[in-house]
Image (tube, rainbow, N blue to C red):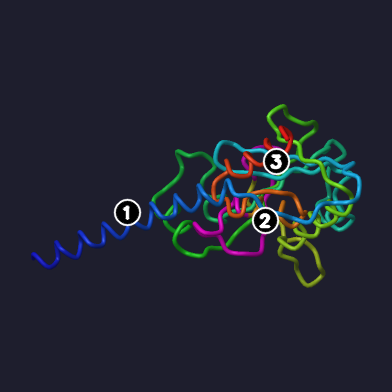
Amino acid sequence: MKKIILYLKRFGLFCMASLLFYLFSAFLLSFLSTQPEPTTCPQTQGIYVTSNGVHLDVILSRQQLSALLQQNLHLSPETAYVAFGWGDKGFYLNTPTWQDLTFSTACNALFFPSETTLHLTYYRATHQDWKYIALCPEQLKQLNAYIQATFTQNAQGEFIKIKEPGYFYNDVFYEAEGHYSFINTCNCWVNNALKAAQVPTSIWSPFDWGVLYHADKKWKD
């Protein structure tokens, strides 16, 4: 019995040390900035990032979407902006509100590399809380390529729409590439999207505040 108690204490200390290391690494690497090559083309385009307090989306206007995205998404005439978010499939489909979150869903998302989905939300106008990020046409092209590559495609090259309904009238789900974990979170996906577009952002940001910090800092500078 004493050995079991000793092992449990050691395991508890290991878990606590691992959590503290994770949080310290997230804090440090979220505030440390990437150093992309300076852009030489004029930054005449503007995208947005937004957070619901936990989860980030990256938002493009309808006109900024590549021909492939516009062709596959079949946007309604009322859609002016499209928000893209990526994350754990089980979490997205089974947790429309925080009250629906279960221990098994959270545990599977955090500790087991899980299937993912893209969550798209359609807007008619911008919102005041969106963070603006200026891009040049080449950066916008790179961002489109990153988003396109995240969609799972069928044999005909079409995006695969998930039959389950969205949370509201203006959102849908698509099958996505990649696996979710506590190392590769929904916010890492947005952070990596900005990296792909050569935008200064966090080195690693599993939480939303790292990306938002650099988005704010860019305009204060």
Residue drawn at x 19%, y 65% is: 7
Q: Residue furthest bottom?
A: 155
Asked if residue 41 lies in the magenta stretch, the reply is no
Provide residue 88's location: percent of width, then percent of height: 56, 55
Asked if residue 175 lies in the magenta stretch, the reply is yes
Q: Nearer the viewer, residue 71 or 45?
A: 45
Q: Which mark is residue 49?
A: 3
Provide residue 157's location: percent of width, then percent of height: 81, 67
Amino acid at dot 2 = Asn
Q: Quadrant of residue 79?
A: top right
Look at mark 1 in the image and give the residue it sits on. 16
Q: Quadrant of the N terminus?
A: bottom left
Residue drawn at x 75%, y 43% is: 59
Q: Which mark is residue 192?
A: 2
Residue drawn at x 71%, y 45% is: 58
Q: Residue furthest top?
A: 128
- Compare marks 2 and 1 and give the one earlier in the sequence: 1
In the picture, measured across the screen, residue 176 lies left or right of residue 185, that is: right
Whether residue 93 appears in this view of the structure is: no
Provide residue 104's location: percent of width, then percent of height: 40, 55
Q: Secondary structure at mark 2?
A: helix
Amino acid at dot 3 = Val
Amino acid at dot 1 = Met
Start-end of magenta stretch: 166-188
